[in-house]
Image: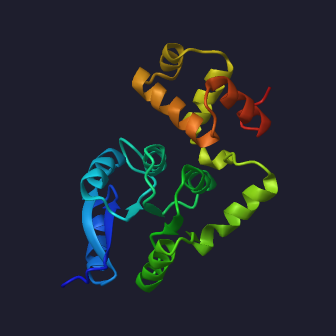
Amino acid sequence: MNKQRESIPIVVVDDHALFRAGLISLLAEMDAFEVVGEAENGVQALDVIARTNPQLVLLDVNMPIMDGVDTVRALRAAGSDLRIVMLTISKRQGDLLGAIRAGANGYLLKNTEPDDLRVSLLTIMADQSVLATEVTGQVMEALRQGHPHVPRQSLTAREIEVLGCLASGMTSAKISTTLVISKNTTKTHVRNILKKLDVSNRAEAVRVAMSQGLLRE
């Protein structure tokens, strides 16, 4: 299909190859858009975006190597003003608020109808933000709570265990030994905990966890 000159260049980022191919095929049928690149994780995405200079990127949240929220942060830290839309299955408050705080322009779910997707993307290109109706309540609840931290269900059982070890003052090496996991796995859990709780260090993570009832004094 021949694209119009004013077609919006898009990069599609998703770690599931079949979904990525289907989305690219769908966008190819829409004259308003032109897919100029694709990637399966955030690291690849940063390289593709630098080479193709898109105006819009569709970005999954949960991906290996570098996830969607970290990718948004990296793009904004580099001064990029391209439109970023999260397209995900995740309705978790932590993912939603993390993406918004990082600088995403929209948060849509993968069950979005094709026509609604097209309208939403054009709305975002018109300098407006778009949220899937299924997650707007999450934003309202966060505002009512008066803080952006994520609820307990956003943390895995293993992350709660690691939090308990942190509260006990254990080092990464000690946590690895105690939970019988590798040091790299321990570091990954700690990094995920800090990101989900929106804190910058272990002590603050423990404080926030206790304040939210994730850990007992």
Residue 167's place in the image compared with 91, above or below, is above
Q: Residue at x 62, y 54 (%)?
A: 97
Q: Nearer the viewer, residue 41 or 120?
A: 120
Q: Residue at x 56, y 53 (%)?
A: 95
Q: Give residue 57's position: percent from left, percent from top.
A: 38, 62
Decide if residue 5 is in sight here.
yes
Residue 1's place in the image compared with 103, above or below, is below
Residue 51's place in the image compared with 65, above or below, is below
**Quarter of the figure with the N terminus:** bottom left
Which of the 4 image quadrants contains residue 216? top right
Residue 45's place in the image compared with 172, above or below, is below
Q: Nearer the viewer, residue 80 or 145?
A: 80
Question: Which residue appears farthest toward the left when viewing the image?
Answer: 1
Decide if residue 182 is in sight here.
no
Q: Which of 63 and 76 is in front in this view?
A: 76
In the picture provided, is 20 more to the left or to the right than 113? left
In the picture provided, is 215 more to the left or to the right than 2? right
Q: Give residue 117's position: percent from left, percent from top.
A: 44, 78
Q: Give residue 127's position: percent from left, percent from top.
A: 53, 71
Q: How is the image coloured?
A: rainbow
Q: Give residue 102's position: percent from left, percent from top.
A: 55, 50
Q: Which residue is drawn at 60% across and 15% down?
A: 170
Q: Nearer the viewer, residue 122 or 12?
A: 122
Q: Residue at x 48, y 19 (%)?
A: 176
